[in-house]
Structures are given as structure tokens and as C-alpha cells.
Image (cartoon, grey):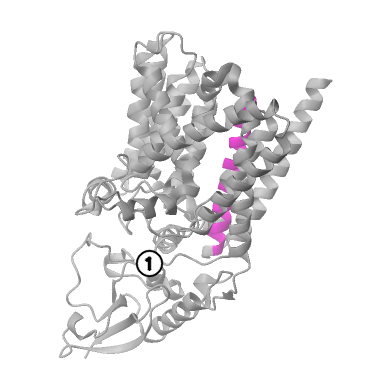
């Protein structure tokens, strides 16, 4: 009876958690569109929903499967960006529920609910939480893979076949998933029990899935474009001349060490407080101090400088530290996952370890999603995999001290939740107006963004000629104005550096976010300006304009 009551209680908690997170993400989905990131993914999903094939008919930089999945959703529901945001909300809600289900065994219902909620409302607001980025689907695939080989399923050979299918599909969702595949193979090689059977099962799943996908690629003549876009461009050319700072990043080590130090200090302080006569006063002062620090860092949550690397400037590094301090737990989980994996796989450490190496490999491999910049938004997308994958090992390492740490965690969790709720409340009460263009129906935003975007879309629909516009603009939302415009060669948007050559004989060319004067950008003897209007915030004093041949 007690067991039945426990299961009912867990299910009710899970249902409440899923509902509350879905409502939160649904509210978030009505916020500003991101003209670049939303547009970049939305135009691919829209093209797929219209029957076009990824790579061959439109650019699919990270992999062809994500736009296919999202295109199916758009066909089933509605061809709007808001519809795609709702789809993302559902996936994130399911992921949040899996965080709870994957950690409650180790940390209990209360802490697991808090972990899931803090993840849900703790997204860095530099990008919207429901940005339909391929990382979200990839993270869900990796989380499901962990469940397939954890707990009572750990020794089931056939489950590694299913994991192989999911991880291989993940490569075609987000190309960096190849790291997951390689790390899983490495950990299977380290196994002592059923090594050959598991290896055969896993490799069979990989080969069958690859064979099926490559037959489709050959059948629809996608190979050349797939190789150029998803493999060559995706791993090299798209990041040309940029600093590679995705995995090797000082914040991962810095915040990881500081978080462990803070947790240890809080644990020791909590133990002393239990023996102190002034426990209430000390509790209040400690929580007030932490709350003040975390709330202050929360006000910096909308900073867009998370990509910056460390420099020799002390001022720059202190500023960077303060801008990212509210994301200390995010960086900590990356740090913890790397340390745990290294410790458990080194021969001299793994003799008495009960951890499943393959689960740790899946968790660690999600760090590859941070390439080429380890900023908090990318960590947030992969955090569910890190949390669920490291939970058993963290539980083992804490051992008899686990309850002491969990008891002390209230000093961090309470002010953190308050901080995130205040930030969310402030964002939710910003004055917003609705977009009038049909592509952005249902979306709302800051007037400084809405009005210029609406004006640009209106002018594109008025002056643009379908199929004759070259978009020399990385903001993809413009290139599907009215759901009818495409850029050169049906790729929707000219990336920087361009994947394809510019169309020198284009009848019309669209530029965005350009400084004045604009005459240096084109030959005014050959072209004239069809329209020009202000660019949206934060591109103050810049313009969007369309030129056409005389």
C-alpha cells in the first residue's frame, strides 16, 4: 500500500511539474522572435513542410533531420513561428519531466522537483528558452538513451541497439553527436561484462541506421550538398577565423571549482549552525547575503557578452565573471561531468566504481554542443543530459554526507529560485505589442523591435519580386516575408562567410543592419534603392534596405 501511495504521489508530482513547466514555456513562446536564430531554424522547417528536401533544396547546416521533424509538426498544426515555439515547449516540458524522473531516486522528490524547475526557469534570457534549435531534440534523444541503459535495464544487450539508433539519428539532428557515438564505443570497450555482445548490438544499430539514412541520401541525390553543408561547412568553414573556445573555457574550471568550494563551505556552516544557539539569526544572515549576491547577478542575466573569452585585462575578466556568476551551477555541471568521467575511466580509479561508464559518456558527450562557444545558453540546452547522467555518480561520491549537502542546499536553492522568478516577472511585464505580419502572427515584442521588423516585412512584400531577391543578410526571418521569398539558390539566407557565391546578376538585393552612408555597398549606376527603413533594436542608427536594377 505504501508503495502504491508513493507511486501515485510521484505521478501527481510529475504531472504538476509537467503542467507548470509547459505553462511557463508557453508564456515564453509569446515573446520576441529572434530574427536570426528563430528565422534560421523556422525557414528550414517551413521549407520542409512545403515538400522541399534538406541540403538539396535548402541549407541544413547542422543536419537534415531537425527540419524534417519540425516540418512534420508544421504540417500537422500550423505554419507559424508560434506553432514551432509550442512544439519546442512540449519537448522541453517532457525533458523537464525526465530530469525529475531521472534524479528522484538519488535526491528525493523535493530536490528533484527543484532541480527541474530551476532548469526550466533558469534559461539565460540572451535567447528565448523555446528557441527551436536542434540541440533541444538532440538532448532529448540522449536523455532517452540514458534511461534505456540505466537502472534495471543496465545489463540488457538489446537496449544498446536502440541507443545506437537514437545516437546515430542524433548525428543527423546536430552533427556534433558524432562525439557521443565515439565516446559510447570507447566505454563499451572498457566494459568487462557482456562486452562482445553489447559491442555487436551497438555496432549493428549504428550500421543499420546509417545504411537506411544513406540509402535515402543517395535516392534523393543529397550526398554532395549534405557533405558540403553538414560535414565540411558545419565543422570547419562556418567557424573560419573565429576563436575555438567551446570546450577549453576558463569559466568551466573557475565556476566548477568555486561551486564545489561554496557547497563545502555551506555544508560545514550548516553543521555548525545545528549546534549553535543563534541558528535563526545566522540562517537569516546567510540566506540574505546569498540572496543579495544572486539577485544582483540575476540583473546581469540578459548580458550578451557570454561568448567573450578571458584576456590579460583584469577589469575585463572581473566584468566577465560578474556577468556570468548567476550561471555558476550550469558551468559546474559541465566541470563535474568531465571530472567524474575522467576519474571513473582511469584504470586506477575505476576498480571499485559502480557507475555506468556509458551513461557518463553520453552525459559528457553533450558538452560537444557547446562548440564553438561555451556560453550559458548552450549549456542550458545540454544540462538535462549532464544532470541525469551524473546523478548516480554524484550520489555515490556524496555517500554518507549526502543528507548534509542536501540540507545545506536550501541556502542556494531558495535565493536562486527567487532570483529567477524576479527576472521572469520583470521580463513578463515589459510593455509589448503584437506583430502584424502573418509569419510572426501571435508573437509579441518590444516596440523598438516590432515596428522596424513589421515595416521591413511590409516593404519586402510590397517591393520584392518573388525568386529575384538575393539576401545579403544573415537574419533569416526577413527572407520568408509573407511565406514566399527565398534568397539565392533557394538557400533562404546568405551566411557569413557565404556557403555559395553571390548572385552578381540578381535583380534585387536586400541588406540589413547597415551603417549609413550605404552608397559604398553597391554601384548606384546599376542599382537604385527600392525602400529603406530603420533597423530594429539593438542596431540603433542602422538601416535595412532593398536595391533593384535600374
Is residue 341 at least partly visible in the picture? yes
**Predominant secondary structure, magenta span:** helix
Residue drawn at 40 percent across, 60 percent down: 304
Q: Which residues are magenta?
A: 82-107
Q: Residue furthest front?
A: 277
Is residue 93 at least partly visible in the picture? no
Q: In the picture, residue 323 is in which quadrant? A: bottom left
Residue 132 image position (x, y, % from top left): 48, 54
Residue designated by label 1 = 476
Residue nearer the viewer, 415 or 377: 415
Residue drawn at 37 percent across, 49 percent down: 64
Residue 3 image position (x, y, % from top left): 78, 21
| Residue 121 on the magenta span | no
Q: Tell me if residue 509 comes above or below residue 164 in the rendering.
A: below
Residue drawn at 19 percent across, 54 percent down: 241
Whether residue 338 sits left or right of residue 519 in the image: it is right
Q: Quadrant of the N terminus?
A: top right
Q: Tell me if residue 128 comes above or below residue 355 in the rendering.
A: below
Q: In the picture, residue 484 is in which quadrant? A: bottom left
Classify mark 1: residues with Cα within 10 Å, few (<14), some (14-19) or many (20+).
many
Residue nearer the viewer, 374 or 203: 374
Whether residue 300 sits left or right of residue 284 in the image: it is left
Residue 95 image position (x, y, % from top left): 57, 41
Whether residue 26 sits left or right of residue 532 in the image: it is right
Amino acid at each position: 500500500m505504501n508503495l502504491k501511495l508513493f507511486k501515485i504521489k510521484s505521478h501527481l508530482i510529475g504531472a504538476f511539474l509537467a503542467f507548470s513547466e509547459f505553462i511557463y514555456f508557453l508564456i515564453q513562446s509569446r515573446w520576441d522572435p529572434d530574427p536570426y536564430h528563430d528565422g534560421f531554424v523556422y525557414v528550414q522547417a517551413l521549407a520542409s513542410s512545403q515538400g522541399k528536401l534538406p541540403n538539396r533544396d535548402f541549407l541544413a547546416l547542422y543536419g537534415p533531420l531537425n527540419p524534417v521533424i519540425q516540418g512534420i509538426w508544421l504540417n500537422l498544426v500550423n505554419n507559424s513561428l508560434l506553432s514551432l515555439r509550442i512544439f519546442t515547449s512540449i519537448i522541453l516540458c517532457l525533458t523537464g519531466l525526465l530530469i525529475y524522473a531521472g534524479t528522484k531516486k538519488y535526491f528525493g522528490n523535493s530536490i528533484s522537483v527543484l532541480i527541474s524547475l530551476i532548469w526550466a526557469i533558469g534559461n539565460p534570457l540572451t535567447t528565448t528558452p523555446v528557441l527551436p534549435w536542434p540541440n533541444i531534440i538532440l538532448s532529448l534523444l540522449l536523455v532517452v538513451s540514458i534511461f534505456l541503459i540505466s537502472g534495471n535495464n543496465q545489463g540488457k544487450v538489446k537496449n544498446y541497439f536502440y541507443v545506437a539508433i537514437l545516437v546515430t539519428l542524433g548525428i543527423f539532428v546536430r552533427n556534433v553527436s558524432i562525439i557521443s557515438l565515439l565516446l559510447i564505443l570507447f566505454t563499451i570497450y572498457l566494459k568487462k561484462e557482456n562486452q562482445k555482445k553489447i559491442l555487436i548490438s551497438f555496432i549493428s544499430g549504428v550500421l543499420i541506421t546509417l545504411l537506411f539514412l544513406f540509402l535515402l541520401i543517395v535516392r534523393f541525390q543529397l550526398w554532395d550538398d549534405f557533405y558540403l553543408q553538414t560535414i565540411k561547412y558545419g565543422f570547419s568553414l562556418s567557424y573560419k577565423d573565429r576563436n575555438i573556445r567551446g570546450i577549453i573555457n576558463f569559466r568551466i574550471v573557475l565556476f566548477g571549482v568555486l561551486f564545489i568550494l561554496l557547497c563545502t563551505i555551506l555544508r560545514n556552516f550548516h553543521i555548525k549552525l545545528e549546534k549553535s544557539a543563534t541558528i535563526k539569526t545566522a540562517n537569516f544572515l546567510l540566506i540574505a547575503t546569498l540572496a543579495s549576491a544572486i539577485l544582483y547577478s540575476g540583473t546581469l542575466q540578459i548580458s550578451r557578452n557570454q561568448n567573450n573569452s578571458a584576456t590579460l585585462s583584469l577589469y575585463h575578466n572581473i566584468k566577465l565573471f560578474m556577468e556570468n556568476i548567476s550561471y555558476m551551477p550550469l558551468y559546474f555541471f559541465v566541470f563535474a561531468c568531465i571530472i567524474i568521467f575522467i576519474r571513473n575511466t582511469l584504470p586506477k580509479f575505476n576498480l571499485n566504481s559502480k557507475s555506468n561508464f556509458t551513461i557518463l559518456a553520453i552525459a559528457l558527450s553533450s558538452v560537444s554542443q557547446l562548440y564553438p562557444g561555451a556560453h550559458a545558453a548552450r549549456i542550458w540546452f545540454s544540462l538535462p543530459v549532464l544532470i541525469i547522467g551524473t546523478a548516480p555518480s554524484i550520489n555515490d561520491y556524496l555517500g554518507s554526507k549526502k543528507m548534509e549537502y542536501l540540507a545545506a542546499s536550501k541556502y542556494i536553492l531558495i535565493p536562486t529560485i527567487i532570483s529567477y522568478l524576479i527576472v521572469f516577472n520583470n521580463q513578463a511585464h515589459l510593455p509589448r505589442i503584437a506583430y502584424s505580419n502573418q509569419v510572426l502572427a501571435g508573437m509579441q515584442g518590444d516596440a523598438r523591435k516590432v515596428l522596424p521588423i513589421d515595416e521591413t516585412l511590409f516593404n519586402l512584400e510590397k517591393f520584392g519580386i518573388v525568386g529575384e531577391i538575393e539576401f545579403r543578410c544573415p537574419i533569416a526571418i526577413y527572407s520568408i516575408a509573407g511565406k514566399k521569398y527565398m534568397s539565392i539558390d533557394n538557400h533562404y539566407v546568405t551566411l557569413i562567410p557565404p556557403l555559395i557565391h553571390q548572385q552578381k546578376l540578381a535583380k534585387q538585393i536586400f541588406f540589413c543592419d547597415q551603417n549609413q552612408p550605404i552608397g559604398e555597398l553597391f554601384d548606384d549606376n546599376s542599382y537604385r534603392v527600392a525602400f529603406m527603413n530603420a533597423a530594429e533594436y539593438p542596431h540603433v542608427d542602422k538601416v535595412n534596405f532593398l536595391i533593384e536594377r535600374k
